[in-house]
Amino acid sequence: MLLSGYVSAIAVWTRAMLLMAGPVQMGLLKGWYLVPPMNVGQWISLALFGGIIGMGLIEWRFWCKYLCPTGAVFSLGALLSFTRRKVSTDCISCGQCETVCDFGAIREDFSTRHSRCSFCQSCGGVCPVGAIDFTDRWSNAGQKPPPVGAAVTCSRRSLLVGLGTAATAGRVWLLLSARMALAVVDKQTCLPYAGRKACRYCVDECTAAGYEAIEFIRVGGQVDETGRPVDGSGFVAPAVLKEKCVGCGLCQMRCRAMNVKNEHLLVGSAIMIQAGPDPQYTVV
């Protein structure tokens, strides 16, 4: 179901609405400086959304018929269903059932492509002679004989099922090898570490969120003749507590919003979410 989560129509639609309405809501209610820039993944999601809309111009329910991975997965259950669509010998070959079917589940001879049938029973509702019934798959009394030598078609949904299986296997591998990202302070650009000015945006944001995964340490301080630190010298700078950090990215967003976009002190955020090889980065 990993593939379905990325490209199923409902998920794509929901993400597109969030990506379009979410930044507007954030900007109007809390400030435009908090709106992060669009990344590649977000542009891909919007492109998929446009693709679903555009494909509907090619053919009615094009996505649902041919590309929807959710339908492809559910179609496996249809192959094992105890109930099947059956056409009796009373069929007059009027073609109304084939016309009304939105999923292309009815062949030219009015037999059924069971992997595409959703059991909506629309075909049975339009049949003028009541020749269509949904009954147990083992009952063939009074039914039209199945087509002889019917070819097995390799549909695009079958391809998507195979891709979904491969994606699931890939997901297992990723879980075994993935690393969780944690916050890392760039001491070359961080304002206190660079000796430019005091800054506590990341610490305040982390504390407000309840994680308390960033603490202060003093850097750049001076000492007197006895080796004791001189009061007021140096700055307090952020230090990440790896055992508490959850990689949420709030600190990075806050630093970017204030120091990069609002105050123009930095080119990029001085605290970044990065994954590393150490044991604390391991997911499983």
Image (spheres, rainbow, N blue to C red):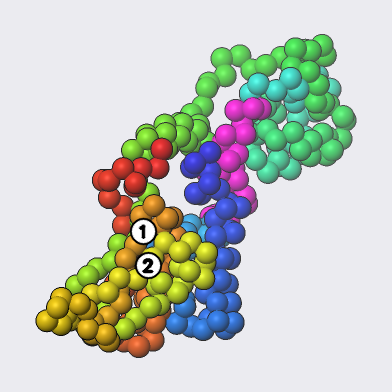
- The answer to whether 125 appears left or right of 256 in the picture is right
The residue tagged 2 is: 215
Residue occupied by mark 1: 241
Q: Can residue 221 be seen in this snapshot?
A: no
The picture places residue 49, in percent across and down from the top left corner, at 52, 60
Per the picture, the main secondary structure of the magenta-coloured stretch is helix
Q: Residue furthest left?
A: 225
State if disc 1 and disc 2 touch (CB < 8 Å).
yes
Residue visible at 45% across and 68% down in the picture: 206
Residue placed most toward the observer, 73 or 191: 191
The image quadrant that residue 270 belongs to is bottom left
Image coords of residue 165 (percent x, y):
46, 31
Kind of residue indicated by mark 1 = Leu
Q: Quadrant of residue 235?
A: bottom left
Cα distance in 3D space between marks 2 and 1: 7 Å
Residue 168 lies, with reference to residue 26, above or below; the image says: above
Residue 196: percent from left, percent from top? 23, 85
Q: N-terminal of the two: label 2 or label 1? A: 2
The picture places residue 250, in percent across and down from the top left corner, at 44, 67
Relative to 144, is 128 above or below? below
Is residue 284 positioned above or below 7 on the image? above
Q: For mark 1, does the 10 Å Cα neighbourhood hold few (<14), some (14 to 19), or many (20 or more) residues?
A: some
Range shown magenta: 55-78
Name which residue lies at 37% across and 67% down: 215
Q: Is there any visible trace of residue 149 in the rendered image?
A: yes
Q: Dot 2, crowdedness within 10 Å: few (<14), some or many (≥20)?
A: some
Q: Label 2 sits on what residue type?
A: Glu
